[in-house]
Image (cartoon, rainbow, N blue to C red):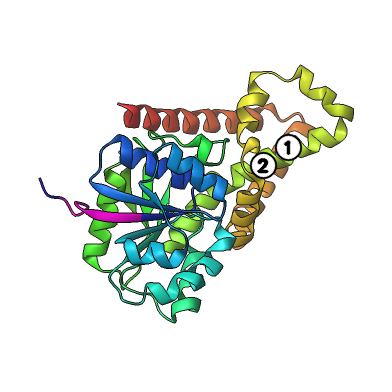
Amino acid sequence: MMTLLEGKTVGIVGLGLIGASLAAALRSRAVPLRRVGFDLSSDTTSKALHLGLVDVVAEDLHTLCNEADIVVLAVPVLAVPGVLAAMAPHLLNGETLLTDVGSVKGSLIAAVQSVFGELPPWLVPGHPIAGGERSGVDAANPELFARHQVILTPHEFSDFSAIETITELWQSVGADIQMMSVERHDEVLAATSHLPHLLAFSLVDTLAQESEKYEIFHYAAGGFRDFTRIAASDPTMWHDIFLSNDKATLTVLDHYIEHLQGVRKALQTHDGATLKQIFTRAKKARDYFSSILEQRAR
């Protein structure tokens, strides 16, 4: 059956974990797309070609844009404006669709408006809710997006056929699609992803500074391991994310600090009833989240 992707070429700019995993997933599922890759690192592009993740490597962005029907930006958030500026002259024909994988959508919209002077109909921003602690092309995982959500945040001028094509691109690698406004996306991700990473980074850094030669970590068990797992994530990527989504993250961080002060007060005054209420509500919410994950897995 003919699909919107049949015979098209996808150009993936940035072959880190997400870009390389998308290429791997498209190959693994035999999606009828030609895969063109580009990365500033020649070692990365050589590996991607050697591993068969891409069919061909583009020498520059001009070549990639000329060959691609769909361009996927998979570069660090703060690198997007520069990459967009370099690509702009080759996207103005309006025949190439553009999407991204960034964890912050407001900064992408601002960058596009700055570079193009408008929000073009061929732009459909996106964000796969998937990742891992490992990074780089060597971490490519063809099942990274299976049964995971991809949030698309089309703007008011996004062409319907462009939305359909980008939707099918992500569905073809096993993802579930959700639609959301740019503003709501950045608020939700600040609460569910950005804040947890900030807390994990901060806790590990705090303990590391308090213990000479990391001695304290010899006594840590599963709870510490599970809670701080995400502190092993790419520091550069998260540096970019926090600086790009600072307002929404600060809002949820302030709310968390206020709540944490309440926990501290309850502990200080031996208010066991309040502590138990907090823990009970938290367990109920976490159990609900677990049930959602189980449903997705099925």
Q: Residue at left 64%, top 19%? A: 222
The reply, left or right, for residue 45 in relation to residue 177 is right
Q: Position of residue 39 (x, y in %)?
A: 51, 54
The amino acid type of the residue labelled 2 equals Leu
Q: Position of residue 214 (x, y in %)?
A: 83, 27
The reply, left or right, for residue 56 in relation to residue 263 is left
Q: Using the rendered view, name the quadrant where residue 273 is placed.
A: top right
The reply, left or right, for residue 78 in relation to residue 158 is right
Which is nearer the eye, 105 or 62? 62
- Rounded to the nearest whole Å, what is the CA distance between mark 2 and mark 1? 6 Å
Give the residue furthest to the left: 1
Q: Residue at left 28%, top 52%? A: 167
What is the quadrant of the N terminus in the image? top left
**Relative vertical location of residue 119 with respect to residue 21 in this rendering, above or below:** below
The amino acid type of the residue labelled 1 equals Leu
Which is nearer the eye, 181 or 233? 233
Q: Quick one: SS at disc 1?
A: helix
Residue position for label 2 = 199
Residue position for label 1 = 203
Instruction: Please state the extent of the stretch shown in magenta in the rendering.
Output: 3-10
